[in-house]
Amino acid sequence: MILQAMHAYDQVDDETFREIIADIINQSPKYHTLSLEEKRSLAVRLFNRMRRLDILQSLMDDDSVTEIMVNGPEHIFYEKGGQLFPSDLRFESNRALEQLILHFFSSANRPLNESFPIADLRLPDGSRANAVLPPVAPDGPIFTIRKFTGIRPDIRSLIENGFITEEAACFLSSSVISKKTIFLCGGTGSGKTTFLNVLSSFIPKDERVVTIEDSAELSLQGIANLVRLESRLPGPDGHGGVDIGQLIRTALRMRPDRIVVGEVRGSEAADMLHALHTGHPGSLCTGHANSCYEMLDRLVTMVMAGSTLPYDAVIRQIAMGVDIVVHISRNREGHRFIDEISRVLPIRENRFQIEHIFTYKEGIGLVKG
């Protein structure tokens, strides 16, 4: 009935669609016995099912929920306050969950089917969604949403929350201003992108900055001469894809003062290293690693995957191109904090040498030396 009613309109915005649902519920004899509150609840459920995220919409509307994880129709979890909780929400079947996911991605023109069973999507509000369909996910469709909370913390709030000390904050802000190249590393959800946004606030406002990301999450404030680039997956025909490496090479032709890369995780590290050695110091990047030293080792592997340079040349160029590495941790209670800030020194005997400027000590916090 609802779909039939929509045929009378060329385009149906959300407000009109709500009115159509309400009219049908009020006019249908089937719903006459329902109370006004029950009718309102039914209208919301129908609207969410057809225009939003069905039963997940209540979690999307909860500002305190930062991540939603759907592991099949009967196992739904969410993150709140840095901790994970199971949800009582359930989908009727694998098919119901899969239909929701397919509708969600098709409305954004993102291919998701048996040929392309994995897809990523950035929502208009900045949230990120990822979906994996069977047979890649044998227990049912997997759907994950990392919500954009809209909260952009500044360095002062991070100091007050114990994320970083004032002394370490002064050191890093001075490093950004003096165009030191800084690599932020840590695990998934540790707060790398959030802290990258905070550090970017110290970039002088008269500089030209190019940001490069897989999925645009960075939110640099106060920079007038800002260029944002985002990679693109290949289309159904396998063509039209634009990767991070291509974007870095393109950025070099844009006369940037700085290049900010949301995440380096593959052979594009070779292009990033080239950029650092062609007059573009002061870059900010993130990557996944369990320590500052491990980040440097991972960079070697990534650069060698996209370069023909020998090992000794790669580590020498990394040591010359990267000035500071910062490691961010997240404990079991969900608290995020910086546990290591290191300076990269000249290599010795083909090995990286780092100086720990700040390290985290249990019960004390981040201390110098």
Image (cartoon, rainbow, N blue to C red):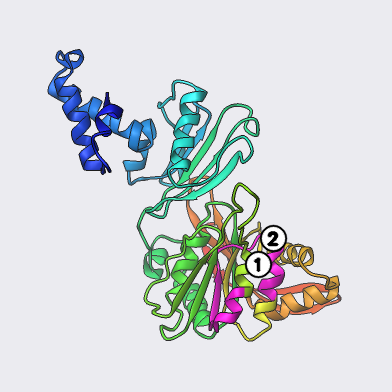
As drawn, is 167 to the left or to the right of 46? Answer: right
Q: Please tell me whether residue 266 is drawn above or below residue 223 in the rendered image.
A: above
Residue 166 coordinates in the image, percent (x, y): 44, 73
Which residue was labeled with disc 1? 245
Pointer 1: residues within 10 angstroms few (<14), some, or many (20+)? many
Residue placed most toward the observer, 347 or 58:
58
Numbered label tally: 2
285 or 24, nearer to the observer: 24
Are the residues tagged 1 and 2 within 8 Å (C-beta)?
yes
Q: Position of residue 294 (x, y in %)?
A: 71, 62
Q: Is residue 365 left or right of residue 63?
A: right
Circle 2: is it few (<14), some (14-19), or many (20+) Cα within 10 Å? Answer: some
Snapshot quadrant of residue 40: top left
- Residue 44: x percent and y percent? 25, 31
Point 65% across, 78% down: residue: 275
Q: Quadrant of residue 270?
A: bottom right
Image spot of residue 212 (x, y percent): 55, 67
* Residue range of the region highlighted in magenta in the rendering: 250-273
Rendered residue at 57%/51% (across/down) = 188
The quarter of the picture where residue 162 lies is bottom left
Secondary structure of residue under mark 2: loop
- Cα separation between marks 1 and 2: 9 Å
Which one is earlier in the sequence, the residue at label 1 or at label 2?
1
Q: Is residue 268 magenta?
A: yes
Q: Amino acid at mark 1?
A: Gly
The disc labelled 2 sits on which kind of residue? Gly
Residue at the disc numbered 2: 266
Residue 274 visible in this rendered orientation of the protein: yes
